[in-house]
Amino acid sequence: MTDIQVIDGKTFQAGKILCLLRSYAAHAEEMGNAPSVKPDFFLKPSSAIIFHDENIIIPPQSEEVHHEVELAVLIGKGGSNIPAKQAEQHIAGYGILIDVTARDIQAKAKKNGKPWAIAKGFDTFAPVSDFMKKEKVTDVHNLDIWLRVNGDIRQMSNTSKLLFKIPEIIEFISARMTLEPGDIIATGTPEGVSRIMPGDIVEAGIDEIGILKVGVE
Ligand code: MG
């Protein structure tokens, strides 16, 4: 079992990870896709979670693994059909998740009309930070979000560019599957995704939330 920590707060057993896709226009564009018009999402297994100072392991099946830095929302109180207006009560905190993606496997799966899990569910493909209590974050929809590889900035954006507000995302997802305490919503990545290689040091940060550093092997 994997424990998710809220800084100065409760510990949650990690549940399912719900990942938004094409939720920043500039990333959808760099992949040659249209941005989502509703909060489309896929599932990533909790077995993929690793933490600060651990290593992403490049699987033998892939030659091209990418980073995607994402703002993550930790669910503290479960529910289904949660109206946007009440969504705030269900949030325990905010963190950073790197949606590691085997881009070559994904490209093949997309061509065949298959879903995302095969490219995004490998062990170690979900590095997560500790979570900041929601009360400590002044405006979650206006935070700088960035990712560096070996000190070079690869991704730099702001959560104001997220096409959906978090309450709207929670309303949409919880109308389709029950959210449980310990579930994590990864809200999608801004532009600048790129390849990572064994030996790289990946640091991802979000203002007011923290920095998540992992290696690659
Ligand atoms: Mg992603």
Image (cartoon, grey):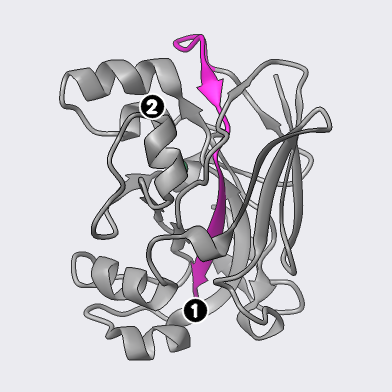
Q: Quadrant of the C terminus?
A: top right
Most foreground residue, 160 or 169: 160
Q: Secondary structure at mark 2?
A: helix
Name the side, left or right, on which 16 lies relative to 143: left
Q: Which residues are magenta?
A: 59-76
Residue marked by disc 2: 119
- Tell me residue 69's x, y (percent): 59, 45
Name the side, left or right, on which 111 lies relative to 3: left
Name the amino acid, label 2.
Answer: Ala
Q: Residue furthest left?
A: 113
State whether residue 180 is above or below residue 110. below
- Tell me residue 79's x, y (percent): 31, 80
Q: Residue at x 33, y 29 (%)?
A: 32
Q: Earlier in the sequence, mark 1 or mark 2?
A: 1
Name the side, left or right, on which 172 lies relative to 134: left
Q: Is residue 75 magenta?
A: yes
Residue 93 location, quadrant = bottom right
Name the amino acid, label 1.
Answer: Ile
Residue 91 shows which numbered tag?
1
Q: Is residue 7 magenta?
A: no
Most foreground residue, 78 or 129: 129
Most foreground residue, 30 or 50: 30
Q: Which quarter is ligand 1 in?
A: top left
Residue 86 location, quadrant = bottom left
Name the side, left or right, on which 137 lies relative to 35: right
